Image: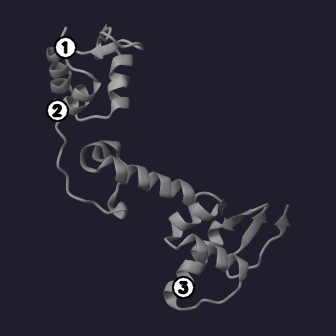
Amino acid sequence: MSGLNYSEVCETLECTRRQAERYVKDGKLNPKYEKQPGQRGKPRAVFLQSEVEELRKSLRATLYKPQIVEEKSLTEIPPTESYLLNQIPLEAIESYYQLNSLRMKFTLALDEAGIVSGLPKKTILQLARDNKISALRTGLGWRISTHSLEKYCQNFLTGDCGSSAVVLQNIH
């Protein structure tokens, strides 16, 4: 019986060996197993050329036609769902709602504070240690006051960077 082995299937489908094994597990490919003459061990998996080509065509088929939209800034996103579904890329919607949900928190982790403020985590950590923003030490991490962080960023933009914040307390 002649057919394609795993390496030839991977070349045809332009995928890894692991992905080809997943196609077999999912039932998208059905190998026939043949014993190798003169050798011991597992039988060799052989795939039909027509079956592999059919899977290749189905993988390459366009399932949807993406709509070309122009880039919009996050400040231009109105809350109406019909507009969101038709005009804004999904990544922009997700980041917009993630940013708004972070802004509604009272305290932020260092990563979240970096997302909201646009400052590096090391800078925010140094601001907390220097009492320039209100922060709460929790074990090995820090919780940053959202209000204090926004106030610091506004003062930074206007040029007034006073150290009016206080470290709340240490919690171990």
Return the x and y of residue 88 as percentages of the image width and height: 29, 51
Q: Nearer the viewer, residue 162 or 113?
A: 113
Mark 1 = which residue? 48
Identify the image quadrant of residue 9.
top left
Label for residue 62? 2
Return the x and y of residue 29 as percentages of the image width and height: 28, 16
The tag earlier along the polypeptide, 2 or 3, is 2
Label for residue 156? 3
Is residue 63 visible to us here?
no
Q: Quadrant of the N terminus?
A: top left
Residue drawn at (72%, 78%), measured in percent from left and top? 129
* Disc 1 residue type (three-letter): Leu
Q: Nearer the viewer, residue 46 or 114?
A: 46
Residue drawn at (34%, 30%), measured in percent from left and top? 17
The tag earlier along the polypeptide, 3 or 1, is 1
The tag earlier along the polypeptide, 1 or 2, is 1
